[in-house]
Image (cartoon, coloured by chain):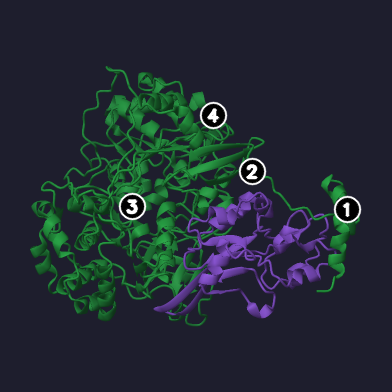
Amino acid sequence: MAIGRRRFIQIGAAGAGAVAASGLATRFWGLDGDPVPDPRTDGDKVVATYCELCFWGCGVLAHVKGGRVTKLTGNPHHPLSNGLLCPRGAGATGLLYDPDRLKRPLLRRGKRGEDVFEEVSWDAALNETAARLEDVAARHGPEAVALFTHGSGGAWFKQFMKAWGSPNVGAPSYAQCRGPREAAFTVTYGTPLGSPEPLDLANARCITLIGSHLGENMHNTQVQELAEAIGKGAGLVVVDPRFSVAASKAKYWLPVKPGTDIALLLAWMNVLVEERLYDAEYVARHTAGFDELKAHVADKTPEWAWAITGLRPELIRASARFIGGARPASLVHPGRHTVWYGDDTQRERAMAILAALLGSWGRRGGYLAQARFPLAPYPLPDGLPHHPGERAKADLPRSGGYPLATEVLANGLCDATQPGHALYDLKAWIVYGCNLVQAMPARQELVEKMQHLDFLVAVDVLPSEICGWADVVLPEATYLERDDDLSAPAYKRPFVAIRQPAVAPMYDSRPGWWIAKELATRVGLAAWFPWKDAQAYVATRLAASGLSHEALAEKGVLLGKVEPTCEEEGLPVSAATDDGKIQLFSKELAALGFEPLPSYHPQEEGAAGTFRLLSGRAPLHTFGRTVNNRLLAEPYPENEVWLNADAARSLPGFELRPLEQGEKVVLVNQDGVRSTPVRAKLTQRIRGDCVYLVHGFGQTARKLSYAYGRGASDSALTSRYKVDPIMGGTGMNVNFVRVERAGEAA
Amino acid sequence: MSSAAKRYAMAVDTRRCVGCNACVIGCKTENALPEGGFRDWIVQEVWGTFPDLAMQIRSERCNHCSETPCVAACPTGASHVADGGAVLVNPAKCTGCKACMAACPYGARYVHPGGHVDKCTFCLHRVARGDDPACVEICPTRSLTFGDTNDPDSAVARLLRARRHEVVRPEAGTEPNVFFLV
């Protein structure tokens, strides 16, 4: 190749390298060198901690330079991150440096919900909170105070509630999320799955996802393992009305009619049983009720399911054979956000039973045993002062119900503010880190319930929607600015991880441990918080556990003993049920008056011209918690409503001017609730009978200056919900919307 | 000079990639990119009609082409070919005239608020000390493999021998060095 002009200039530049290296530009381009650009974002200090952009809890390394966090990388020692991060974990600086953060404590000045506040001192805010809580306790008993909590800092407020004497501690992550799954696995296997789930995706030969959209739903370790499985040639079976990212990687995509999953699951079981593809030896040894199951699915043929699900019998058979052929390393993923239709425990039961037929419980490539890292609790002194609260939790209606709820129902705690609904009324809420406005269905009802409260205090990092409804708002420091309790969830590889601040709290924000301790002190319960600070608390726990605080602070995580996790590693298959067998047929459910084997019952359909509203996740966002994070919002600033492109051509009201790609529309649900304007994504990637929104957008909090007004909220359109009679979960995929062009009157 | 023999390249496994954007955010923070500036991005390409569909997900960036229309178009010598064939912009020499942006078939460049054109550097500052580029290091699906294709034992060379791969817009004649495993 001939030497061109530029090459010639480069040669000239090499001679001038000394000038460029000394930092002096010659102002004569040809003589300047071309240094390798170095953004110099490596930290002067690197702090190991665990992430809180979602609730998975990956180990991260925070790079700190000149007092600022420059970037986050994965902690290679942490078994949940393995050195790799999802975008949210990498984008935590967008939260830390969010200009809209809560900066000082706030006291309500307008009417509740008007979002008018005055900045006050911590003393004033905490004194007010303490006085109002004590007033509620004096008049209604300590149990009239409820705590909603999501996130690691919530542990300090749970401690407060223990001292305070109220059992009303709940999180929407149960009855508005994984609750039905936990109930179903408890019925079937004697144990809930918890988070992180003990799944062996990496070694599965077949992974079946039912409505779960891993890859868009970005639980780091699970996505890592999904990719590893794909890399090793595992096949995916994806059941989803939408051609999800996972569906695009699947061997079989089953675009099921929404609400008919149970029929498909029964048909799959029919094929497995009829064609003897199930693990007969495993079923005989480890399960109870196979004969009943066999009789139950005998007539649930793929042809029967065809008319219900819209899936061709050949597709149902072929996918069933593929699923059966990969056993026992054939993993039916249990899902996570499972509150869809109000019969969700039964659908999860069908999935749990299918997993048992495949012999995947307790086997490699299936469901593994998990263990907790052994840690000593903080040794609290005896005889601590205690409020006299003795009443049971108030999350159930007076008539009772939901016998298999394994955790407190957040929706039940909301209902209990309605006078006379529960055994006693709730009069005050402490809301830690969860935006109930987006988490709960039936927003209008929620707003009315909140008006019955004597007092609502919100502890948050951002001025989220729920803060607008509070009487006092307490600004918490972000996870990068605070210590917290140790993280040691049950997992297939036990571990303990430490939370430690990378930088000091900005503005006048304070860590959760400090807020809870100060509050306790003001109500005479300081003895319940004997530690100087969270670091001292953690140090005491570690010392009592015989662990080195220094080593943990340095590495961020310590790994527990490697124990066998499946039969292949020498651990016998077992179930924690009464008789030690996997309950295919559930006598427990039968005794409670529920169907002992899952059956398909048709869901209510929407009116002509309406679409069933479905929702899910985008990988850059954790509910509404990240939509104001500029860094994460840049590639995904607002959600779109997914609408089948062919269905869009025959939309009522669009006859004269068809809906165009990206045009803004308003969704109107069956009760007349209207969404904020949202762009239409006309796509072949979804069935024609439903629309899809990524959850978390359509924020109504004006103080979230970036996110306010962007996209539409599925939860605002979820004015109806169907409660699961077994465990009380709120099925939310039961709303139907019509599409209107934005700006046009109804 | 041994570095002259290097040919840096990247393999992007479209089967593993879920399009999560971790590479994008990892790049933005590693390189302290300004708001609105991206050196890499996700493309989802969909074929077919419901229910017979296919989709390819690609983490795209500058292709660090062997034939460089951007360098040819640059009037000041700011765009240049650096170590290992990586295409860089020297901000000190760049006037922000955007000739390179017009010449690039891939839209891989943007104007930095500092007035110069900015683009992927293959994180040469990290590569120089033996690390992978930030996008490669963070990727939760391990879809990205960086290395020297002139080294037959490198992971990227092995992958390119083992797996069918394609480049974006081969008809542009730019001979990209970012390969998409299909």
Q: Nearer the viewer, residue A141 or A393?
A: A393
Q: Between tags 1 and 4, which lies in front?
A: 1
Which residue lies at the image location 87% right of the left edge and 48% below the top edge? Answer: A19
The first of marks 2 and 4 along the sequence is 2
Quarter where residue A135 is shown: top left
Which amino acid type corresponds to the residue marked 4 in the rendered image?
A: Val
The first of marks 2 and 3 along the sequence is 2
Q: Are marks 3 and 1 in contact (CB under 8 Å)?
A: no
Is residue B42 at all visible to an observer of this figure? no
Q: Which residue is mark 3?
A: A177
Disc 2 with disc 1 on a shared chain: yes
- Rendered colour, chain B: purple
Which amino acid type corresponds to the residue marked 2 in the rendered image?
A: Asp
How would you rate the neighbour count of disc 4 (Cα within 10 Å): few for under 14, some for 14-19, many for 20 or more? some
Q: Which residue is mark 4?
A: A120
User: Residue A16 got which mark?
Assistant: 1
Query: Mark 1 falls within which chain?
Result: A
The first of marks 1 and 4 along the sequence is 1
Disc 3 from disc 4: Cα separation = 36 Å
Which residue lies at the image location 36% right of the left edge and 38% below the top edge? Answer: A560
